[in-house]
Amino acid sequence: MKIITVYATLMLTCVCNYGQNLIGLREKEVMKYMKEKRHDMNYNNVINSKFNYLKYSDNSENETVLFFLTPDSVCRSVRIICDESIKSQKIKELDSKYVKKGENKWIDKRGSKEYLIEIMEGKWSCIISIEPEK
């Protein structure tokens, strides 16, 4: 039992230190994290028969965060859609928190697991995806 408690504490500590990379957390844990740590983001109730995900957006509509879930309601990937006006701010944030892997790519290392963070550019927005490294 002590091992489980220590593991859970370490996992939550890692999650709190790594921003929105909440991969591996259950749906309720993601919702709790967002409620406690991201007061600027609002939960949007969405129903989609193809994808199971949680959607959050800020009041100014500059940022939307999607947490894609497995059928068992565990976060498997994160997608952040940002207005082009805050792209440079997001790149600075990624540069300061993660290891640069290449053009618009970073690696988030947590223990033995690595997660690829990538920015894809659109016409008026940029998309930041976070997925387990393959």
Image: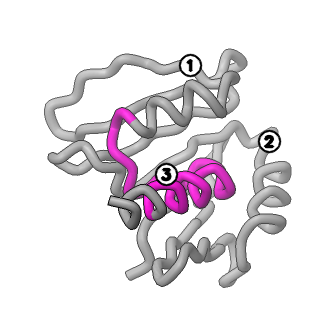
Which of pointers 2 and 3 lies earlier in the amino acid sequence? 3
Of the two numbered discs 1 and 3 in the rendering, the one whose residue sits closer to the viewer: 3
- Mark number displayed over residue 105: none
Q: Which residue has dot 3 on it?
A: 22
Secondary structure at numbered mark 1: strand
Magenta range: 7-28
Q: Which residue is pictured at 53% across the width and 38% down the height?
A: 65
Quadrant of the rendered structure where residue 60 is? top right
Q: Is residue 108 above or below residue 119?
A: below
Q: Could you tell whether 90 is left or right of 7 in the image? A: right
User: Residue at the front extreme?
Assistant: 2
Quadrant of the snapshot with the N terminus:
bottom left
Q: Is residue 48 above or below residue 43?
A: below
Gap between marks 1 and 2 measured at Cα: 18 Å
Q: In the rendered structure, which amino acid carries the disc numbered 3?
A: Leu
Name the foreground residue: 15 vs 63.
Answer: 15
User: Residue 25, how many percent across, how many down?
Assistant: 39, 50
Residue designated by label 1? 42
